[in-house]
Image: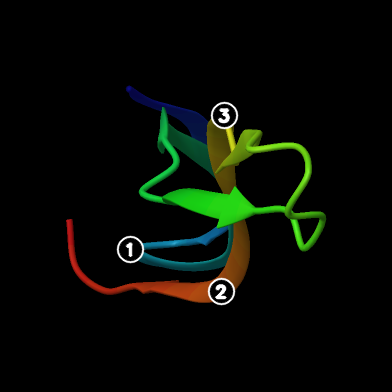
Amino acid sequence: MNFGVGTDLRVPLGAAGVGLRLELSDTMHNSPLNIQVAELNTLNDEVVRANGGLVHNLRASAGLVLHFGR
């Protein structure tokens, strides 16, 4: 799943303008990590699964906006 929000904060200068663009987004997915880890104790044959669960990839960006013309 992917969701986010963004906006442009502009200052009009006649037919042109300048501003700041801000964006924040998050992509969520299940972890590809799914491995088996065996214990070193040979008396106990337990196997442990390592699973990362849900992974978030958060991204924040900012940039300069230049607007020319109408």
The quarter in which the C terminus is drawn is bottom left
For residue 8, say whether it is visible. no
Which residue position is annotated with label 1? 15
Q: 54 or 44, which is in the foreground? A: 44
Q: 45 or 21, which is in the foreground? A: 45
Which residue position is annotated with label 3? 53
Q: CA distance from mark 3 to mark 1?
A: 51 Å
Write down the quadrant of residue 2 in the picture.
top left
Q: Secondary structure at mark 1?
A: loop
Q: Nearer the viewer, mark 3 or mark 1?
A: 3
Q: CA distance from mark 2 to mark 3?
A: 33 Å
Q: Secondary structure at mark 3?
A: loop
What x and y, as percent, mark residue 31? 44, 42
Q: Secondary structure at mark 2?
A: strand
User: Callout 1, which amino acid?
Assistant: Ala
Q: Mark 1 or mark 3, which is nearer the start of the sequence?
A: 1
Write down the quadrant of residue 16 in the picture.
bottom left
Lateral position of residue 7 relative to residue 68, left or right:
right
- The answer to whether mark 3 and mark 1 are in CB contact below 8 A is no
Which residue position is annotated with label 2? 63
